[in-house]
Amino acid sequence: MMVFEGVRRSMIGLGFSAIFVFSFLTYFTMSGLDISTSVIWKNMLGSILMGIYFGSASLLFEIEEWSPLKQTSIHFILSISIWLPLSIIIGWVPFEVLPILIGITVFVITYIIFWIGTRFYLIKLEKEMNSTIRK
């Protein structure tokens, strides 16, 4: 059952990556930019891999034996460990010290923003559920 859920979430991640790539391709087309097939292919591959990873990595938050801190810490470490090498290989981040530091900083800030958003959503959901139970 866990394998099925992992595949299902990977497919959801692929869907998000497709929307992301399509958005960029639409922007490039509207801007009149001409991009080579190899560049598009390489960037789509990176997007697909990240979509599969983030889709399936959400399963880490289903491990009830782990504390939320452990779940988040492991998810963060795995995420940056996969994103950073991939982003350097694909060319999203140049292999130089300053761009890598900037890339890591942007990644961490983005991760924190998503974490805070998720946290506020779960707190709101908890309040709504408690309110419903009290009625």
Image: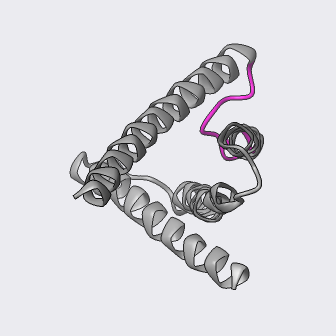
Question: Left or right: where does residue 106 sit relative to residue 128?
Answer: right
Q: Quadrant of the C terminus?
A: bottom left
Q: Residue at x 52, y 25 (%)?
A: 109
**Where in the figure is residue 33, as x and y percent of width and height?**
33, 47
Q: Nearer the viewer, residue 93 or 110?
A: 110
**Where in the figure is residue 81, as x and y percent of width and height?**
77, 41
Question: Left or right: where does residue 114 sit relative to residue 98?
Answer: left
From which residue to which does the magenta span run? 85-96
Q: Quadrant of the N terminus?
A: bottom right
Q: Does residue 23 show up magenta in the picture?
A: no
Residue 49 image-quadrant placement = bottom right
Q: Nearer the viewer, residue 92 or 48?
A: 48
**Where in the figure is residue 91, as x and y percent of width and height?**
64, 40
Question: Left or right: where does residue 118 sit relative to residue 33?
Answer: right
Q: Residue at x 59, y 60 (%)?
A: 38
**Where in the figure is residue 62, as x and y percent of width and height?**
65, 61
Residue 77 image-quadrant placement = top right
